[in-house]
Image (cartoon, helix red, strand yellow):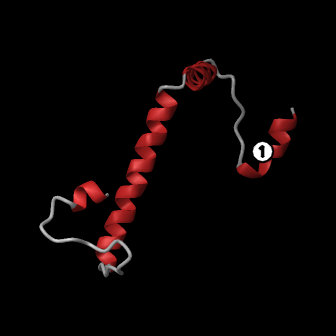
Amino acid sequence: MEKILHKFNHKFDLNQNVVISRTTLNQMLDAFEKMESAISTIEILTDKKAMKAIKASKEDIKHGRYVEGSIKDLDKVMAE
């Protein structure tokens, strides 16, 4: 952060309060959520074990090896 701030001609006090609009805050939070999502996707795509499990799951679905139900039925399905 300090490297970025040095590009400006005046000094910033990092302990000073900053006021930003609600719109800007929402845009910043949205950008943060998108970055988190992108990082999670990259982590999954680079995890060989996870990708192997995803591929196996797709094959199971393709061959009809799945159970339909609702979230309420999850405990029952997992017990089988």
The C terminus, quarter of image: top right
| In the image, farthest residue toward the right | 79
Return the residue nearer the eye: 70 or 13: 13
On screen, residue 23 above or below 61: below
Q: Which residue is drawn at 70% across and 38% down?
A: 68
- Decide if residue 65 is on the left or right side of residue 8: right
* Residue with the mark numbered 1: 74
Which residue is located at x 16 percent, y 71 percent?
10
- Is 20 left, or right, of 52 in this rendering? left
Q: Where is residue 8 in the image (x, y as percent from the top left)?
A: 15, 64
Total numbered labels placed on residues in the image: 1
From this view, report whether residue 12 is shown above or below residue 51: below
Q: In which quarter of the image is residue 19?
A: bottom left
Residue in view at x 39 percent, y 51 percent: 34
Residue 49 lies left or right of residue 80; in this view the side is left
| Residue 1: x %, y % from top left | 31, 58
Say which amino acid is labelled 1: Leu
Q: Position of residue 15 (x, y in %)?
A: 38, 76
In the image, what residue occupies the spot 37% across and 61% down?
30
Of residue 66 and residue 6, the one placed in the foreground of this image is 6
Local crowd at mark 1 within 10 Å, few (<14), some, or many (≥20)? Answer: few
| Image-quadrant location for residue 79 | top right
Q: Which of 58 and 1 is in front in this view?
A: 1
Does 45 appear above or below 31? above
Q: Quadrant of residue 61?
A: top right
